[in-house]
Image (spheres, helix red, strand yellow):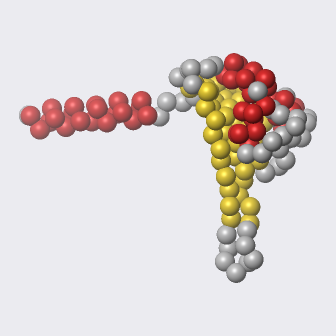
Amino acid sequence: MKLEIASSVATYILLLLTNTASAEPTRICQFDPDLGVSNPLGMRAYITISEEDGNTTFVFEQFPSNIGNGQVPATIASQRFLTFYETDLASARRLMLQNPEFYSELVGYPDPEGFAPVNATLTCSP
């Protein structure tokens, strides 16, 4: 009997931890090709924004590219994350638009156009 109770408690704790660890973002914004404009970052890079628990995270992702001289198959890809803590998604987008240094840090290079061209191609859900 004690073993059954201990097993049930352990199962309950495991389920609770699993459900807590897999929280879904409340909102996600990403490039929308249906807007009819091309991605200002090109076809191999994207920015995704997600809001979760009052924090907003921007992810800059570059898809894998082949590298090397062909002797050994190799690719390289990268992701950079920028998180605004205790900042909702709309406020974080305004910060990116108003402060070019945030955008430059996210993408890893200075961009004279800043975040505005990318921001114009994003669609959010829900």
* 37 sits left or right of 19 in the view: right
- Relative to 90, is 32 above or below? below
- Relative to 26, is 110 above or below? below
Nearest to the observer: residue 78 or residue 112: 112
Nearest to the observer: residue 59 or residue 4: 59
Percent across and percent down for residue 5 are 15, 32
Q: Quadrant of residue 114?
A: top right
Residue 109 visible here:
yes
The quadrant the N terminus occupies is top left
Percent across and percent down for residue 59 are 66, 39
Percent across and percent down for residue 21 are 43, 34
- Relative to 117, is 39 above or below? below
Q: Quadrant of residue 12?
A: top left
* 25 sits left or right of 9 in the view: right
* 52 sits left or right of 58 in the view: left
Residue farthest to the left? 1
Nearest to the observer: residue 123 or residue 60: 60
* 84 sits left or right of 120 in the view: left
Residue that appears at 70% across and 39% down: 106
Percent across and percent down for residue 80 are 65, 44
Residue that appears at 84% across and 29% down: 116
Query: How many labels sit on residues?
Result: 0
Residue that appears at 82% across and 49% down: 43
Residue that appears at 23% across and 36% down: 10
